[in-house]
Image: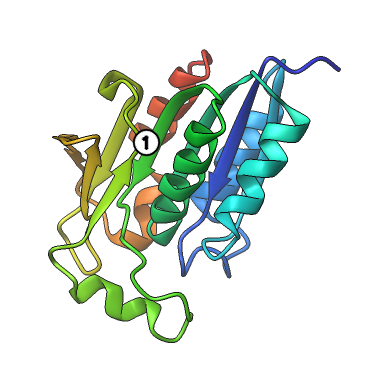
Amino acid sequence: MTFTRTATTISGFGSSARHQSGTLAIEKRCLELPGVYAEYYPWDADPEGIAWHLHRQFPGLDHYFWGHSFGGHTVAKVCQHLYDLGEPLAGVCLVDPVVKVFRHWLLSPLSTAMWWAKIKLPPISVSRVTVFNQRMNKPDGDTVLVGRQVVKPVTLDVKHDDIDESPEAAQAFLSMLGQYV
């Protein structure tokens, strides 16, 4: 099969343990799309390793990313590595992204107390970045910057653990890939 684009989905802290998370469902939908190479990673995956894998296996393809909670922070790191390697970043969908200040998993929940922390994407077109946040419970999504520009999030009326299952977020990501729900 010839691939024309990649779709990388990275789950959040709690959704990694669930067997039926919205992030896994998105990855499964992407696998059904013609020409899309899709992969799923947990929130604590190595961003540089993911970037090198995509760069070596799929050089020059359009790369799309979905990140939920701490997975949003991991997506930002992968994107920075790919940007540094000269790879095209075609689209990013961050779903209630949370900055991961601490590397050890026991300390990671403390990241939600770091109100000044921001998720920073490399300078790509802001029109290619969609952010969904919720304000019903903690953690709630952190500020996302593309270069120095703040990306205005779409606020959804769902809890943090459920936002990656929202039809609005799924529609946005699949639309980036050229497939409507």
| Residue found at the very far right of the displayed protein | 1
Q: Is residue 103 visible?
A: yes
Residue 147 in which image quadrant: top left
Residue for point 54% across, 66% down: 44
Q: Is residue 128 above or below residue 100?
A: above
Q: Is residue 59 above or below residue 29?
A: above
Where the N terminus falls, by quadrant? top right
For the point 52% across and 48% down, the residue is 23
**Relative to 178, residue 148 above or below:** below
Residue on which disc 1 sits: 169
Asked which quadrant contains residue 151, the reply is top left
Of residue 64 and residue 171, the one placed in the foreground of this image is: 64
In this rendering, does residue 181 appear at all? Answer: no
Count the numbered circles shown: 1
Residue located farthest toward the bottom when viewing the structure as drawn? 106
Residue 2, by quadrant, is top right
With 132 as the anchor, is 76 left or right in this view? right
In front of the other: 78 or 43: 78
Of the residues shown, which amino acid type is indicated by label 1? Ala
How far across and down, in percent of the image, does residue 92 sit?
41, 32
Give the structural element (helix, strand or loop) at label 1. Answer: helix
Q: Is residue 135 above or below residue 36?
A: below
Which color scheme did the rendering employ for the protein? rainbow
| Mark 1 burial class by Cα count in 10 Å: few <14, some 14-19, many 20+ | many
Q: Give residue 96's position: percent from left, percent from top.
A: 30, 52
Residue 1 relative to residue 41: left or right: right
Residue at 50% across, 35% down = 84
Q: Residue 18: where, in percent of width, then height?
A: 57, 66
Q: Position of residue 123 (x, y in %)?
A: 31, 29
